[in-house]
Image (tube, helix red, strand yellow):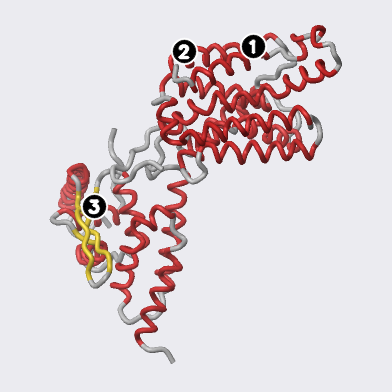
Amino acid sequence: MSGPGDGVSGLERRYRRLLSWYPRDHRERHGEEMLAVLMAGAGERARPTAREFADLLWAAVRLHLRRVVAADGGVDPRDVLAIVSLLGPVALLAGATTGVHEIAWWVKAGALGEMPWSTQFPDAPVWVLWAVVAVLVLTGVRRAAAVFAWLATASFVLIAASFPFHQWWNGMSAGWMLTGLLTAVALTFAPGPARGRELVGGRGIVVMAGTVVVAGVLGVLGHGDPAVELLRLVVVVGGTVAACGSGSRVGRRAALILLLPTLTMVLSLAQWLVLGRIPVAAEVALFYVLPVVVLLALGGLPRRVRRRPDQPAT
Amino acid sequence: MTEAALREPTFLILTALAARPQHGYGILLDVEEISGGRVKLRAGTLYTALDRLSADGWVAVDREQVVDGRLRRYYRLTDEGAARLETEVQRLRAHTRAAERRLRLRPAGGTA
């Protein structure tokens, strides 16, 4: 038989269990306070009522949804872009992997001088420009970095338009194009790499650079091997999220922008499996418009949402 | 742009905070009293609303107390929240007046 004291502690335990479904930040801010309100209204009850149970669970779902779409104002898109402006130029260097693989092949064949650059590595100037941007960002020369970022983005468009086999409107190319464009935007308009460095620290840069190197080596040495490609995918996703800060909502959204090439690659596979070939206009909508809409919905890009005054962005 | 009408729980929570800061349980009791016992908010709904109202800058934390070992946080209406509540009151008043005027014009005994 249980006494009244056991009843109260049992009730509190049940309420705590229900409150554990709430978002962490909400729990930390309001958990004890909510518990006090629930206990004050419980009287002699030993269990939450069915209505209370439903109300608490439904509220938890709504609060989680508000955080997913950043409607609570807890994500500052300027900080997201600050991280992108710092790590974007480094992350973009992974785009040169296929070209580096080509160079490696011609070096191995002892015929690098005969390599037809315009067909084997037509976008080489783009990645050279992004390498310049990365150096400028890491040495703190932001304005010049922004200028070179726009040059790199324009070069990508120019090369894509000049080579018909370079399908800029779909697949990974769309992801590189979008990430490049958003990095250029971030370098020009966001608080900049210095703020990004405050958010992710030197560790973030080292992790991002390490991820690009490992992904590049795997891509060059294991090119075409499904197991290695899968491993590469894991390295890119894990490394990018870790570099941006997996424990922070701002960091996770920045990682989403830097992972756009990976996401559009997966989207491309899904397209071929489900839809097959579709008109170019539909591909532009799928590979450019959809990712931007998703980023806007998740609060990864600036939009009109009030920042809550009592809560710092996380 | 015309602001959307406040939902009833939001209106009642802002009204409960209009005269003085209140803690969560106090708001629940006051909302019930203001609505004549018709609206009984529960903790989940209240704190979802407070989360949203804080994000909108309409309510803010006033102070905190520990009573009988439990945290009690008081909320107050901000100036922005008071202005929004006042706008809503004006809107409801205009609707009420229109309804009263038209009811007075109604023929005695109905329209049958």
Q: Identify the image quadrant of residue B55.
A: top left
Given the image, on which type of amino acid does mark 1 rest? Pro
* Residue shown at the point (36%, 59%) measured from the top left: B45
Q: Nearer the viewer, mark 3 or mark 1?
A: 1
- The x, y position of residue A236, in whole percent, is 64, 36
Q: Do marks 2 and 1 share a subunit?
A: yes
Per the model, the C-alpha gap separating discs 2 and 1 is 17 Å
Given the image, on which type of amino acid does mark 2 rest? Ala
Q: Which residue is mark 2?
A: A144
Closer to the camera in the image, B7 or A277 = A277
Is residue A306 toward the left or the right of residue A21 in the image? Answer: left
Residue lying farthest to the right in this orientation: A109
Up-down relation of residue B90 to residue A78 (above or below): below
Up-down relation of residue A191 to residue A109 (above or below): below
- The x, y position of residue B36, in whole percent, is 21, 67
- The x, y position of residue B29, in whole percent, is 23, 67
Q: Which residue is mark 1?
A: A125
Mark 2 belongs to which subunit?
A: A
Mark 1 belongs to which subunit?
A: A
- State whether residue B73 appears in this view: yes
Residue neighbourhood size for the residue with mark 3, other residues' Cα within 10 Å, grouped as few (<14), some (14–19), many (≥20): some
Question: Circle 3 sits in a helix, a strand or a loop, which is it?
Answer: strand
Q: Give yes or no for contact between labels 3 and 1 (Cβ–Cβ under 8 Å).
A: no
Residue B61 marker: 3
Mark 3 belongs to which subunit?
A: B
Up-down relation of residue A108 to residue A39 (above or below): above
Q: Identify the image quadrant of residue B46.
A: bottom left
